[in-house]
């Protein structure tokens, strides 16, 4: 039987060390390889100049790996950078670099497409093609790191907020988080990572117990089941009386404040009455509410809330002692809504 190809990019230092033992090579080569791929961004074994040429060739033959390639790059005037990256099998994902006062965050995609079908989202339109591997997740950060290094900067935060539902790709996601934290690689603190979810309740409990205290960002978008169900089909399986206890459990177990994402949709979920309902739902919960100005998507009928209504909503929530901010819009002149770049490219290719 043919041996499964080694997925080198999804392996941590210990797995790579075990692989080198299996290949009758010194164990320390595994750690060396991990460092060269993730710290020095090596694109092939030939760049491991600390290795004898014979070992470079042996590994090229036995365990080839290829890294993501950018097929489209858009840079906005504020330096927000949107990348369309090609994976080894030709599928494409979007990755976005966002400038903040503290440094750059990288928004990573977790799946090719998405099955959650949120009615306001560009990414759900094409459906999910497949999950990404831990290595493909990590390589999006690796690519971003390479770009930032050329600007004399580095990745400060990673947010699993791009295309896909990260908790629907659970094992690869958790492995990615651990690999991203690995000191011999990119070495990012768990506190500088955010996992976003549409609200997959069982996976929220599971993540709380993993011992990796990342920030959980829940796409809430509505304070009642009727309204949320009209926006997000996931609310049928996991209504608010199941979702909110899971969020509380996450917060209590990890000691991290949960973030609730709230898209501001004109005339849908942005009235003062709805702001009061949100206050009732979140009262006494150690959380943060992030109000997100809506980026119109051609296929969806929603319109952005006028700014005066967003500010009124903010005021009501804040008056009740709930931490709440309006998300700053970055890279406005490029295809800003998640999934737009990939869909545009696929339309061109059709
Ligand atoms: S908002 Fe997120 S979970 Fe919902 S369809 Fe889009 S990518 Fe999927």
Image: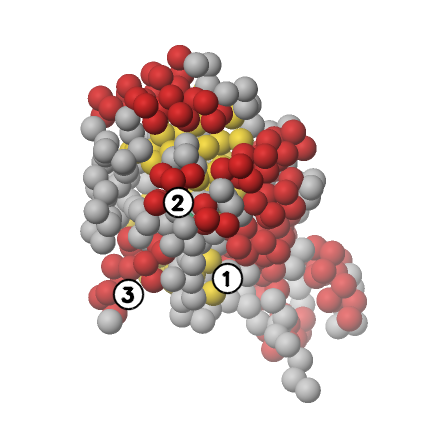
At a point 65% along the width and 29% down the height, the residue shown is 252
Q: Position of residue 293 (x, y in %)?
A: 29, 33
Q: Secondary structure at mark 3?
A: helix
Task: Give the residue at x 34% y 36%.
Answer: 263
* Mark 3 vs 1, N-terminal side: 1
Q: Does the residue tagged 1 have its C-beta within 8 Å of any atom of ligand 1?
A: no
Disc 3 vs disc 1: Cβ atoms closer than 8 Å? no
In the image, 341: left or right of 256?
left
Report which residue position mark 2 lands on.
229
Q: Residue furthest front?
A: 226
Confirm or deny contact between disc 3 and disc 2 (CB under 8 A). Answer: no
Secondary structure at badge 1 equals strand
Q: Nearer the viewer, residue 63 or 42?
A: 63
> Does 123 appear above or below 248?
below
Q: CA distance from mark 3 to mark 1?
A: 18 Å
Q: Nearer the viewer, mark 2 or mark 1?
A: 2
Residue 140 or residue 202, whichever sits in front: 202
Residue 145 point in image, percent of width and height: 47, 46
Residue depth check, mark 3 versus mark 2: number of the one nearer the observer: 2
Sequence order check, earlier mark of 3 and 2:
2
Q: Is residue 97 left or right of residue 1?
A: left
Examine the image and state in which quarter residue 133 appears: bottom right
Answer above or below: position of 280 versus 143. Answer: above
| Outermost bottom residue | 1
Q: Is residue 288 visible?
A: no
Label number found at residue 346: 3
Q: CA distance from mark 2 to mark 1?
A: 25 Å
Task: Tell me what residue is drawn at x 40 percent, y 25 percent.
Answer: 277
Picture disc at residue 131: 1
The quarter of the picture where residue 348 lies is bottom left
Q: Is residue 39 left or right of residue 162?
A: right
Q: CA distance from mark 3 to mark 2?
A: 29 Å
């Amino acid at each position: 039987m043919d041996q499964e190809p080694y997925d080198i990019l999804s392996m941590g230092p210990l797995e790579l060390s075990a692989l080198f033992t299996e290949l009758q090579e010194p164990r320390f080569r595994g750690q060396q390889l991990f460092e060269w791929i993730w710290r020095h961004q090596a694109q092939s074994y030939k760049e491991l100049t600390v290795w004898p040429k014979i070992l470079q060739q042996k590994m090229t033959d036995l365990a080839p790996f290829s890294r993501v390639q950018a097929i489209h790059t858009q840079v906005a005037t504020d330096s927000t950078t949107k990348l369309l990256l090609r994976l080894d099998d030709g599928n494409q994902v979007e990755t976005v670099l966002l400038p903040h006062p503290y440094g750059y965050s990288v928004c990573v995609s977790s799946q090719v497409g998405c099955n959650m079908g949120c009615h306001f989202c560009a990414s759900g339109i094409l459906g999910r093609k497949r999950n990404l591997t831990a290595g493909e997740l990590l390589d999006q950060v690796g690519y971003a790191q390479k770009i930032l290094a050329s600007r004399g900067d580095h990745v400060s935060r990673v947010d699993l907020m791009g295309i896909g539902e990260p908790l629907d790709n659970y094992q690869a996601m958790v492995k990615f988080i651990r690999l991203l934290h690995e000191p011999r690689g990119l070495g990012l603190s768990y506190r500088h990572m955010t996992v976003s979810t549409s609200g997959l309740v069982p996976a929220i409990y599971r993540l709380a117990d993993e011992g990796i205290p990342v920030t959980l960002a829940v796409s809430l978008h509505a304070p009642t089941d009727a309204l949320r169900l009209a926006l997000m089909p996931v609310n049928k399986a996991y209504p608010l009386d199941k979702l909110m206890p899971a969020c509380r459990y996450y917060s209590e177990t990890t000691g991290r404040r949960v973030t609730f994402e709230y898209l501001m949709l004109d005339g849908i979920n942005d009235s003062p009455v709805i702001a009061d309902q949100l206050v009732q739902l979140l009262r006494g919960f150690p959380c943060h509410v992030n109000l997100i100005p809506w980026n119109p998507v051609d296929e969806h009928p929603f319109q952005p809330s006028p700014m005066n209504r967003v500010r009124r909503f903010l005021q009501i929530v804040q008056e009740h002692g709930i931490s709440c901010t309006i998300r700053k819009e970055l890279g406005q002149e490029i295809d800003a809504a998640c999934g737009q770049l990939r869909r545009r490219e696929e339309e061109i290719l059709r």
